[in-house]
Image (spheres, helix red, strand yellow):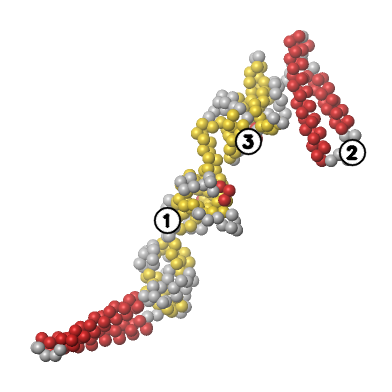
Amino acid sequence: MHKILAIVVIGSILLSSCGSDSVKNDSLEDKKARLESLKSQQDRLDKQITALESEIVKADPSSTVAEKAKLVTLTSLAPTSFTHSIDLQGNVDAVNTSYVSPRGSGGVVRAVYVIKGDAVKQGQLLLKLDDAIQRQQLANAQTQSAYAKDMYARRKNLWDQKIGMEVDLINAKNQVDQMESQVKIAQEQLDFTNVYADISGVVDDITIRVGESFAPGGQQLRLVNTNNLKVVVQVPELYQERVKVGTPVKIAFPGLNNKIVTGTVHVTGKVINTGSRTFPIEVRIPNDKDIRANQVSVVKIQDYAATNALTIPVNTLQSDEKGKYVLVGVTDKGRMVARKRTVTIGQLYADKIEVKSGLQAGDQLITDGFQGLYDGQLITTN
């Protein structure tokens, strides 16, 4: 009987469709409108068929033909924790990076003591600059200092014998002090020809060679402290209200067999880049010998969390003229049938979507075989 009624319904729909198609040059909007109308008619007729079948069975149980149940898979819903994350690409960077510069005016390089990749300690000698002029200046200052000390000693000896003027002794002492200061300055200038490491780390880049000029402000020698790393991420400005200092983060490193570390946002930039419409954030990560500076990472920034949420596979969610709905299995008069449940949805992440209302714990969600099911259709899980 159900098949006969279905044929009648389909015939009615086809007749209606044929009548509507008499105009060959309908616009796209007209076709869409007719399609919505036919869908509405089909839904209404399905309900009428179900009601008539029920009435006929009640009036004449022997007249009904046993309906074949459709095989489905049921999943019992239970509260679970649910999180939503913003997935972005990040870049590993060193917290401490130093471009080495000479302390003085620089000079010509006479010796290079490190190569790229060398581990160095703070204070270690890296380069030696030409020091001929500085050595000569130091020698001259030391000679003048020795002469000033000798003159002071002579003046002091005469003064002790009550010979000479006190002002001459004072001038001689001042001369000694000035020359000692000159020696100290000359020694510092000589020390400036030694270039030392400002931080402990690894020589990440070195382009300076013997015979070349090494001057302040250049980027010819870079040190990176790989023991203290961070991940820098450019976040679209759309998420600026959802990403703050302290926001939980998970970081994966595809090049390291999907190594994952957790952390929180440590720094958020206060300026939007006008070109990319993003702002930077930084996440400190623990020391790990496998993680390298400039390594690419996948950053999952958690911007939403619920502890007792009901979630469903996103592919089970369907739509009709009334909104979003799912199909659940319920027992009705000793039979297992499918029922539509209108739902209100929340956040979507990966293949799961949060259901805010319309379902409750213990509901039997139809997760497989729901395609083509209608409200009230007989189902089975065997």
| Mark 2 nearby-residue class (10 Å; few <14, some 14–19, many ≥20) | few
Query: Of callouts 2 and 1, which one flags the residue occurring earlier in the amino acid sequence?
Result: 2
Q: Which residue is mark 3?
A: 314
User: The disc labelled 2 sits on which kind of residue?
Assistant: Lys
Q: Earlier in the sequence, mark 3 or mark 2?
A: 2
Specify whether 294 is left or right of 146. Answer: right
Residue 139 vertical position relative to residue 219 in the rendered view, above or below: below
Quarter of the view holding residue 325: top right
Q: Which mark is residue 364?
A: none
**Mark 1 surroundings within 10 Å by alpha-carbon count, few (fewer than 14), some (14 through 19), many (20 or more):** some
Q: Residue 228: which numbered mark, if any?
A: 1
Query: Which badge, 3 or 1, comes first in the chain's sequence?
Result: 1
Residue 266 at x, y = what percent? 45, 50
Q: Are marks 2 and 1 in contact (CB under 8 Å)?
A: no
Q: Are marks 3 and 2 in contact (CB under 8 Å)?
A: no
Residue in view at x 56 percent, y 45 percent: 86
Does dot 2 land on a helix, a strand or a loop?
A: loop
Q: Quadrant of the N terminus?
A: top right
Q: Give me the C-alpha separation between circle 3 and circle 2.
A: 39 Å
Q: Residue at x 9, y 88 (%)?
A: 161
Q: Is 38 placed left or right of 95 in the picture? A: right
Name the residue type under label 1.
Asn
227 above or below 32? below
> In which quadrant is the C terminus drawn?
top right
Q: Quadrant of residue 200?
A: bottom left
The image shows residue 297 at horizontal and vertical percentages of 53, 52
Q: Nearer the viewer, mark 2 or mark 1?
A: 2
Question: x, y (%) of residue 187?
Answer: 31, 78
Vertical order, 8 against 133 (above or below): above
Q: CA distance from mark 3 to mark 1?
A: 41 Å
Q: Residue at x 37, y 80 (%)?
A: 131
